[in-house]
Image (spheres, rainbow, N blue to C red):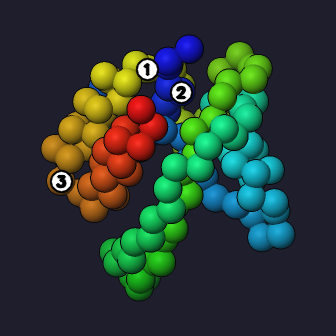
């Protein structure tokens, strides 16, 4: 109760974690896709409790031939149902753990210190989630 599931990717600096996320497959129901991503990244089952926000961003890619990426995020609060936090997506995820809200705010500050676009976007999401979820 009152804890958040957070992940760290392999390239993240020490003490940096963020909320899990992922993409929905073509033809996949939204809720099913969100639950699948949580299971893959966190090794647990959740129940989506409340929609928090939808946001869009246009990223300019420097890798993979460049170009623009129209990115959308849909953010939910979810309740833990079951699972052992033994994640299956070991290619992307280094660690899964529980964090307090005070740590969540610190993760956003660490992201901003990185000064990179993707981290800045995630930091803005962290700040919005913190304001909306409490």
Q: Where is residue 97 in the image (x, y as percent from the top left)?
A: 51, 20
Nearest to viewer (mark 3 / mark 1): 1
Q: Mark 1 points at which residue?
A: 99
User: Which residue is rendered at x = 77% and y = 70% of the image?
Assistant: 26
Q: How crowded is mark 2: few (under 14 residues within 10 Å), some or many (20 or more)?
A: many
Q: In this view, does 42 lie to the left or right of 101?
A: right
Whether residues under marks 1 and 2 lie with C-beta atoms below 8 angstroms apart, the answer is yes
Image quarter hosting the N terminus: top right
C-alpha distance separating marks 3 and 1: 23 Å
Q: Note whether 122 is above or below 4 in the view shown.
A: below
User: Which residue is rendered at x = 22% and y = 37% of the image?
Assistant: 110
In the depicted view, which residue is nearer to us: 56 or 20?
56
Q: In this view, does 106 lie to the left or right of 93?
A: left
For label 3, the SS is loop
For label 1, the SS is strand
Q: Residues within 10 Å of mark 1 (few under 14, many from 20)?
A: some
Q: Note whether 87 is above or below 54 in the view shown.
A: above
Q: Note whether 88 is above or below 124 in the view shown.
A: above
Sequence-wise first label, 2 or 3: 2
In the depicted view, which residue is nearer to us: 80 or 134?
134
Image quarter hosting the C terminus: top left
């Amino acid at each position: 109760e009152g804890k958040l599931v957070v992940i760290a990717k392999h390239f993240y600096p020490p003490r940096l974690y963020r909320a899990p996320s992922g993409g929905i497959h073509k033809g996949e129901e939204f809720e099913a896709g969100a639950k699948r991503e949580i299971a893959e990244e966190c090794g647990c089952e959740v129940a989506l409790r409340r929609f928090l926000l939808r946001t869009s961003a246009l990223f300019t890619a420097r890798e993979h031939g460049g170009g623009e990426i129209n990115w959308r995020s849909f953010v939910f609060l979810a309740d833990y149902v079951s699972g052992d936090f033994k994640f299956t997506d070991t290619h992307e995820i280094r660690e899964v753990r529980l964090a307090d809200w005070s740590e969540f705010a610190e993760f956003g500050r660490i992201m901003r210190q990185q000064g990179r676009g993707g981290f800045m976007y995630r930091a803005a999401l962290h700040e919005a989630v913190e304001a909306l979820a409490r």
